[in-house]
Amino acid sequence: MMTTVQNTQDRRIHPQKFTLWVAIGSLIMMFAALTSAYIVKKNQSSWLEFPLPRIFWYSTGVIIISSITIHLALKAFKAREMGRYRQLITVTVLLGLLFLGMQYAGFMDLEARNIALTGPKSNSAASFLLVITGFHMAHVLGGIIALLVIFVRAYTSRVKNYSSLPIELISTYWHFVDILWIYLFIFYNWIG
Amino acid sequence: MSNEAVIHSPVEIGAHEEHGEHHHHHETFITKYVFSQDHKMIAKQFLITGMFWAVLGGLMSVLFRLQLGYPDASFPWLETILGKWAKGGHITPEAYYALVTTHGTVLVFFVLTAGLSGTFANFLIPLQVGARDMASPFMNMLSYWFFFAASVVMLSSIFVETGPFSGGWTAYPPLSALGDASPGSKTGMDLWIVSMALFVVSSLLGGLNYIATILNMRTKGMSMTRLPLTIWALFFTAVLGVLSFPVLFSGFILLIFDRNFGTSFYLSDIFVNGVGALPNEGGSAILYQHLFWFLGHPEVYIILLPAMGMVSEILSVNSRKPIFGYMAMIGSLFAIAVLAFLVWAHHMFVTGLNPLLGSVFVLLTLLIAVPSAIKVFNWLTTLWRGNIRFTPAMMFAIGFVSLFISGGLTGIWLGNSALDIHLHDTYFVIAHFHIVMGVASMFGMFAGIYHWFPKMYGRYLNNTVGYIHFWVTIAGAYMIFWPMHYEGLAGMPRRYYDYSIWESFKQFAELNRFISTVAMIVFAAQLLFLFNFFYSIFKGRKMTSLNPWQSNTLEWTTPLRPGHGNWPGEIPEVHRWAYDYGKDGVDFIPQTTPVGADESHH
């Protein structure tokens, strides 16, 4: 009996991983809706054209690096190199926070250039940038909170946990949020 | 088998059953009845919360039907319950619109989405696929509690000083985006949108779980083509929800920014009486309509598909015949699910939509008639020469088919963009969607409740009361909505507060009074059902057999009152599809029976 259970589990994807993939599909629909609304709006009158904040280029680099670090963290966890694993998730959290700070700086940059993001003088072009980017930031923040949970667990828990499921789930999500930003970045620059 | 990984200890559950009450259960009142992670309890929570909203939403319709049926009469008792919203016993225009809006929102989302698919997806999916619980029982619990929070917020909006939102359940901007536009657009709208955002989260959490459970946690032998049609329908429902609710959410986010942060996504060139010209420029209210109806149309199938699935199952069981065209039923469900995403603009034919684009949407909309007709054909051929048992559940299932046909046919009218120029925003539309989506789905829900009540509570509902409930409801539903077709064809618009002052629509005064009177009677019949429901939970006739309807599906192989984990021992293995009724002269062969050597192929 034990062996059959083991076998089926090997063959089938873990239900929670599967759930995450469906959730990712759902998130894709949400951003697809926002970016298609962006396209619809852009083709109407009074659309303000402006260059993206330069810092978005750097933040793109940061989030790509954070994807690499979380991938390495997962590998370290699976190899039971716990010291390295702790270091890498710490770096990932810091990179995530840095990314959020840089996006915020990007908004400040726009405001400094007199491109209002909200309020009566705002143009939908800038407001869309704020809403879509801000919404993406909220999802990055969600990933950071999840990382902090396993971060605290990695430092405090006296019970050894060998299940790599939590870190696998978070890393899949983190890669998704990374790819999502790359899509948005390409969209802002060359598609939308 | 991977079920075991989620609910850790099937063996322990078995042990609990044997030891009975004196064994320590780790279950307190709170974990068993309130923050329960057992899908069966969560289903009951959804059902009873849905019933609460159905009563409230139904009562609202009675109140605004009073206004429509008796525009000149004054009802002092209305002032007693509604206060300033019914000064002198007359419902004020603000209250009328608030009632219509809340009725729509509550019935569409809280009753027919959460109450219907929330209840039966939770209850039936693990039981019918052979799983101990959902893929993530915790998320499932969260799903209910987000719904509960949404309910509390929506309920509280009824009590704020400026009243609940009153701009229609679709919440089109600018009315919904500008607090100055109407009293209901102030705090009431803030609460409405918060409530709906919570509701979207609840639906997504639920939907993710349903999909993961159906695809990953089926018991041994339960291939996808052996699933009962209920599960297929609930599966497509969940897929529709997971893909379309996020789009609505996006639309709401933009709306929130327009309301609270002065952006101009939906707003442009607006002058508000008493406020003056607004600075917003360049927004497009039509954009909101696209985002809204991209959910809004799949939403009607989110409501309808679970009813279709349950009706298929109940018709087959009570005809003692296999469902006719099982694969065609799945195919048509799939076709409906795909087309659901491609027809949203038929709600927008008169918004200035490009006529060429409109004709594409006409074509796609009319295509839905094909899978719908396949389903109707298969239901009728399932009944054909069946050994029919007219249980109350069966009555409601047949009633569903009747309503689906009569409501579906008018859909062919409305799907034509040319006819829609005349019919849009008239009572014809109200009649169409109430019959095909509202009442039909309610019938599916009633059928499900009557059929699975014994599995939920171990007792039966009273049949006599059930038959009275059925006949009053179906006769009433037709008497309420059939005349509305005539009113609509005569051009009588929706949403008007008082028709008696319109020369063109005065003639319908008595018809309106008739409709209102029937609406009250039908509402009273639902109270009868509620009494039956709650009385039978405690005092109903006890179940004497584990499989009262001689049904093939897995839920009837569980104990009388299944604990958390559903089966005390191992999960049964499945050897055949769910519809072996009357095969080789045997009345029914449960899915757990191995295929015999001398059995014919199906």
Image (spheres, rainbow, N blue to C red):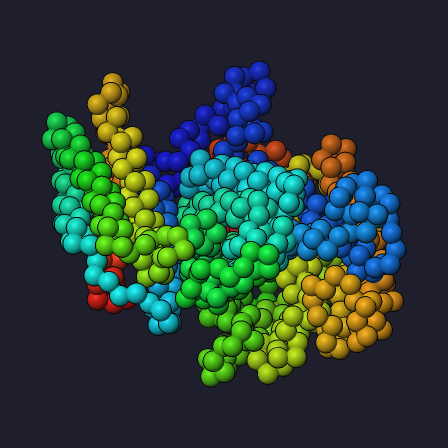
Residue A110's x, y, as percent?
Answer: 25, 53
Vertically, is B482 above or below B219?
Answer: below
Q: In this view of the protein, can residue B313 be seen by the observer?
A: no
Answer with left or right where residue B478 lies relative to residue B160: right
Which quarter of the rendering shows the N terminus of chain B? top left
Circle count: 0
User: Which residue is nearer to you in this view: A32 or A56?
Assistant: A56
User: Which residue is nearer to you in this view: B600 or A38?
Assistant: A38
The quadrant in which residue B583 appears is bottom right
User: Which residue is nearer to you in this view: B231 or B293?
Assistant: B293
Tell me which residue sits at (35%, 69%) in the image: A46
User: Which residue is nearer to you in this view: B398 or B445?
Assistant: B445
Q: In this view of the protein, can residue A44 be seen by the observer?
A: yes
Vertically, is B558 above or below A153?
Answer: below
Tell me which residue sits at (54%, 59%) in the image: B276
Tell me which residue sits at (47%, 84%) in the image: B356
The quadrant in which residue B489 appears is bottom right
Residue B367's x, y, as percent?
Answer: 52, 77
Answer with left or right where residue A27 lies relative to residue B363: left
Residue A187's x, y, as percent?
Answer: 25, 62
Vertically, is B360 above or below B155?
Answer: below
Residue B226's x, y, as percent?
Answer: 48, 56
Tell me which residue sits at (18%, 35%) in the image: A94
Answer with left or right where residue B354 lies relative to residue A101: right
